[in-house]
């Protein structure tokens, strides 16, 4: 299977090439030339299977011939050693908690697979890699954790220092070793822009740069799996039905996993793409016109403060259009089909807070700001679509982080402190390794040249 660039100006490459490169040379994003299909019979077999078995079967369809089955099996076993609870809220409406991994965010699902796959390929060819990652909170810690201590990989993480919580920061900065963390007085989009500029700078060619952001196809493919898993666990056996997913979204990596799952054959009734006040996507879906939001708005669901989602170019490509990395559309996507399959809305901070309060009072369910954006999106969708608002309709809303990552907000809203998962214990006493950097490309470049 080969992967093409959404800018259509680079050669198609194999999975391992796309994984190690991150972004295509023409600054496009890699997508599979054809989406592998999973039959309904195979999908129905997933129902009794644990997560890692489903992961093996789904991911193998993209990696066939590139990695031995036994190796891939060992990698998924090792990467997915934590639970993936589907928590019932009412009727057949569920929260899927993707927050049980080592950094308590859904980004562990992708980062752990990607780190292990990269290490496998680097061992094969004896090369080194310098991973650059901009983070709005959780990518940084998930990537840091997944790559920490790996031999042939160094990691540099850039984060907007005023937009992450203390706990999120400490998850990145308390590691050290091959994990280098840069704090910038900037927005996430500024951090992302520095990383992108570095990738296209020939002066840095000797450093073998790569990306662990969701622009890397190695992050997207693992994120297809939990949509199959949710359906397998939530469905009724021998019953034909379609599932509704609600996905709190920022850079749209999570959504791309879902849309790819649907294109592979998963019976999806609708994707609800819920954003915070950064509403460039709901507006685009409604009007067909795309305008990024600059600077992005600072909302309490901080990991979704994205004014120009990198993965939008991929979505446009999957619907037959072409958008470049700057957001310019050269060929319109099939907007009618997109609207049929995707519903999108923007949730304000006030709605987010009300949702956290209500979910606790009404259902005894503890949500954090990102998951609450998703849940609010589902509630609004069901209110507006009577036909799908019945007890039998299967709906899964994704909870992307653990509530204990946002203790102040949760405590203010529902008056309790969410229990700290093991993964977050003991951060407070540890030494932090962090470098403050001005928001200028020349300083960033100098840092890279001096350090590596
Ligand atoms: C990254 C992140 C998101 C947004 O995911 P995308 O794939 O960028 O859309 C949502 N919630 C949390 C907690 C995150 O860390």
Image (cartoon, rainbow, N blue to C red):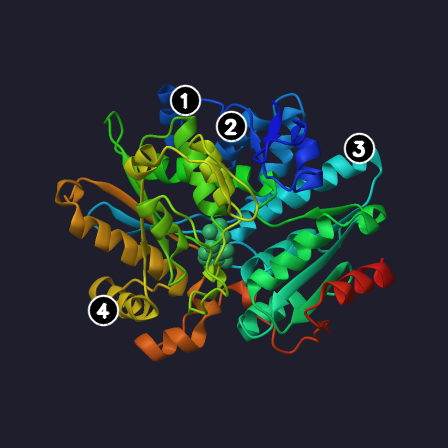
| Count of labels in the image | 4
- The image shows residue 50, relative to residue 307, as above or below, that is above
- On screen, residue 40 above or below 373: above
The mark that comes first in sequence, 1 or 3, is: 1
Q: Quadrant of residue 148?
A: bottom right
- Sequence-first disc among 4 and 3: 3
Query: Quadrant of the image for the C terminus?
Result: bottom right
Q: Mark 1 points at which residue?
A: 42
**Cβ atoms under marks 1 and 3 closer than 8 Å:** no
Where in the figure is residue 381, as x and y percent of width and height? 23, 50
Mark pair 1, 4: CA separation: 40 Å
In this picture, residue 281 sits left or right of residue 237: right
* Mark 4, residue position: 361
Q: Look at 66% across and 52% down and name the residue there.
A: 196
Are the two marked residues, 4 and 3, in contact with CB atoms closer than 8 angstroms? no
The first of marks 2 and 4 along the sequence is: 2
Residue found at x 63% / y 54%: 143
Crowding around mark 2 (Cα neighbors within 10 Å: few <14, some 14 to 19, many 20+) is some
Q: Disc 2 designates what residue?
A: 57
Q: In this view, does 22 lie to the left or right of 384?
A: right
Q: Which of 231 and 133 is in front in this view?
A: 133
- Secondary structure state at the residue bearing disc 3: helix
Name the front one of labels 1 and 3: 3
Instruction: Give x and y (percent) for residue 83.
Output: 46, 49
Question: Percent from the top left, x then y, of residue 187?
Answer: 56, 67
Q: Residue 287 carries which label?
A: none
Real-space CA distance between mark 2 and mark 1, rounded to the nearest whole angstrom: 9 Å
């Amino acid at each position: 299977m080969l992967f093409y660039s959404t800018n259509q100006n680079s050669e198609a490459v194999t999975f391992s090439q796309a994984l190690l490169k991150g972004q295509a040379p023409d600054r496009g994003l890699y997508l599979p030339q054809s989406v592998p299909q999973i039959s309904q019979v195979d999908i129905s077999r997933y129902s009794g299977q644990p997560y890692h078995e489903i992961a093996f079967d789904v991911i193998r369809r993209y990696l066939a011939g590139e990695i031995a089955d036994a190796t891939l099996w060992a990698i998924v076993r090792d990467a997915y050693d934590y639970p993936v609870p589907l928590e019932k809220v009412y009727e057949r409406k569920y929260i899927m908690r993707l927050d049980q991994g080592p950094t308590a965010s859904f980004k562990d699902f992708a980062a752990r697979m990607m780190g292990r796959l990269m290490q496998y390929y680097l061992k094969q060819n004896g090369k080194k890699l310098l991973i650059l990652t901009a983070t709005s909170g959780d990518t940084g810690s998930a990537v840091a954790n997944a790559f920490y201590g790996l031999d042939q990989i160094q990691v540099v993480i850039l984060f907007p220092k005023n937009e992450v919580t203390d706990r999120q920061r400490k998850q990145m900065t308390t590691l050290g070793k091959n994990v280098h963390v840069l704090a910038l007085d900037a927005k996430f989009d500024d951090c992302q822009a520095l990383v992108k500029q570095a990738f296209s700078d020939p002066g840095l060619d000797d450093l073998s740069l790569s990306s662990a952001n969701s622009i890397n196809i190695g992050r997207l493919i693992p994120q297809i799996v939990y949509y199959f898993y949710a359906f397998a666990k939530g469905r009724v056996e021998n019953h034909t039905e379609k599932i509704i997913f609600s996905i709190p979204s920022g850079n749209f990596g999570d959504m791309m996993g879902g849309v790819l799952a649907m294109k592979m054959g998963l019976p999806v009734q609708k994707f609800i793409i819920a954003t915070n006040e950064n509403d460039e996507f709901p507006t685009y879906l409604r009007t067909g016109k795309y305008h990024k939001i600059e600077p992005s708005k600072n909302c309490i669901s901080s990991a979704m403060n994205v004014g120009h989602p990198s993965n939008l170019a991929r979505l446009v490509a999957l619907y037959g259009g072409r958008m470049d990395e700057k957001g310019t559309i050269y060929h319109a996507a099939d907007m009618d089909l997109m609207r049929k399959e995707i519903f999108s809305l923007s949730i304000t901070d006030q709605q987010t807070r009300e949702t956290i309060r209500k979910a606790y009072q009404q259902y005894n369910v503890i949500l954090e700001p990102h998951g609450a954006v998703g849940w609010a999106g589902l509630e609004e969708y069901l209110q507006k679509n009577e036909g799908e608002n019945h007890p039998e309709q299967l709906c899964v809303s994704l909870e992307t982080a653990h509530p204990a990552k946002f203790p102040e907000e949760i405590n203010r809203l529902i008056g309790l402190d969410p229990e700290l998962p093991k993964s977050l214990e003991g951060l407070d006493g540890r030494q932090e390794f962090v470098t403050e950097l001005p928001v200028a490309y020349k300083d960033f470049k100098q840092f890279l040249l001096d350090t590596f």
